Image (cartoon, grey):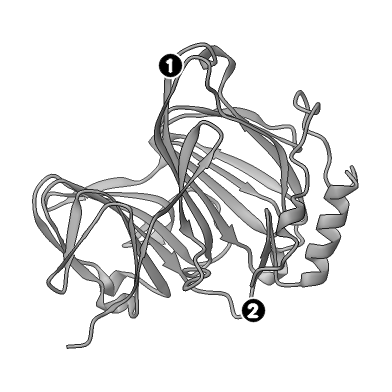
């Protein structure tokens, strides 16, 4: 029988500041899974009292960003005036649209203590008709995220709609970002509930698919979502994500994503010149910014 696994990609670790970030998407072999364009696995990392997360103001266009933490805390500020602490289990959902600026830092009350950081940062593309929409921001509390259990299998629907459940995260296209966890070996047949393209990331433990074992820090992309079934090998936590892909190609340069290369070029110019109409300053965090990287002038597609 032909395998349903189209790709198995190893997490690619890079160092950003004081902690390790594992890049899951994009890869040369796979630029997107459904509308999911970019996934970073942050940590797990232990930061000492003199180490803090400090990502200065930087811009985005053409996407929604999703931040989800397992451990630790990040303080989010943006050019819309939002200022909020992100805690484990909560969802920060920021839609950049035509342009937004945000920063991510260790909260003040933790800056002189040892602390942990572990979580996901995800970019999700916008439908073409919303790429130039006004930016917006939503923060969803942990208690609002749908969680349920069936036959010893625990589910959490972080974003999207699937299995008759719907997350309150205001997504803009058909998608799902689903956590599945087991405490003992379980067979999971879920393909009839999935749609579009689907990827699987094993956070901890391992799964068996078609007789092969796959462990943590591996991203699997299915050829056919409807054939998705697997066995967990005991205590395991994994994520299924995907949905309907867009009909148009998306181009990526640094933090900018769009279906029109001319819009990307204008965004680059606006940020380099610090055009405040296109990219306003962040209240209470306006003394620095991340410069446009000269080394990434090559357009990615």
Q: Is residue 20 above or below residue 165?
A: above
Res. 104 in view: yes
Q: Which of the 4 image quarters holds residue 131?
A: bottom right
Q: Is residue 191 above or below residue 166?
A: below
Q: Which of the 4 image quarters holds residue 8?
A: bottom left
* Residue at x 64% of width, y 79% of height: 248
Q: Is residue 246 above or below residue 163?
A: below
**Image location of residue 102, percent across then percent down:** 69, 38
Under tag 1, what secondary structure? Answer: loop
**Image location of residue 155, percent across then percent down:** 27, 50
The residue positioned farthest toward the bottom in the image shown: 1
> How far apart are labels 2 and 1 at the CA level?
45 Å
Q: Residues within 10 Å of mark 1 (few under 14, many from 20)?
A: few
State the quadrant of the N terminus: bottom left
Res. 89 in view: no
* Residue at x 83% of width, y 49% of height: 271
* Residue at x 59% of width, y 15% of height: 108
Picture disc at residue 44: none
Q: Is residue 239 above or below residue 100?
A: below
- Please give left or right for residue 182 compared with residue 72 in the image: left
Number of numbered discs present? 2
Q: Which residue is mark 2?
A: 248
Towards the viewer: 257 or 169: 257
Under tag 2, what secondary structure? Answer: loop
Q: Which residue is mark 1?
A: 114
**Image location of residue 249, percent across then percent down:** 63, 77
State the quadrant of the C terminus: bottom right
């Amino acid at each position: 029988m032909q395998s349903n696994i189209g790709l198995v990609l190893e997490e690619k670790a890079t160092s950003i500041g004081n902690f390790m970030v594992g890049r899951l998407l994009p890869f040369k072999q796979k630029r997107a899974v459904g509308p999911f364009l970019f996934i970073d696995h942050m940590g797990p990392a232990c930061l000492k009292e003199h180490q803090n997360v400090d990502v200065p103001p930087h811009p985005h266009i053409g996407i929604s960003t999703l931040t989800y933490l397992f451990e630790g805390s990040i303080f989010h500020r943006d050019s819309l005036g939002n200022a909020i602490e992100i805690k484990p289990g909560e969802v920060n959902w920021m839609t950049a649209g035509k342009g937004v600026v945000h920063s991510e830092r260790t909260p003040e009350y933790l800056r002189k203590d040892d602390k942990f950081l572990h979580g996901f940062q995800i970019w999700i593309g916008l439908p073409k008709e919303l790429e130039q929409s006004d930016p917006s921001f939503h923060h969803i509390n942990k208690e609002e995220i749908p969680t349920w259990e069936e036959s010893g299998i625990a589910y959490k629907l972080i974003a999207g709609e699937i299995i008759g459940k719907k997350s309150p995260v205001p997504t803009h296209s058909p998608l799902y970002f689903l956590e599945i966890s087991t405490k003992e070996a379980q067979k999971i047949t879920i393909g009839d509930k999935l749609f579009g393209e689907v990827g699987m990331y094993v956070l901890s433990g391992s799964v068996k698919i078609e007789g092969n074992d796959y462990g943590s820090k591996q991203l699997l992309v299915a050829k056919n979502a409807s054939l998705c079934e697997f066995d967990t090998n005991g205590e395991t936590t994994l994520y299924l994500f995907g949905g309907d892909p867009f009909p148009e190609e998306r181009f990526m340069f640094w933090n900018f994503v769009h279906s029109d290369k001319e819009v990307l070029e204008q965004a680059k110019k606006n940020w380099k010149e610090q055009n405040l109409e296109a990219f306003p300053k962040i209240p209470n965090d306006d003394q620095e910014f991340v410069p446009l990287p000269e080394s990434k002038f090559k357009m990615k597609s």
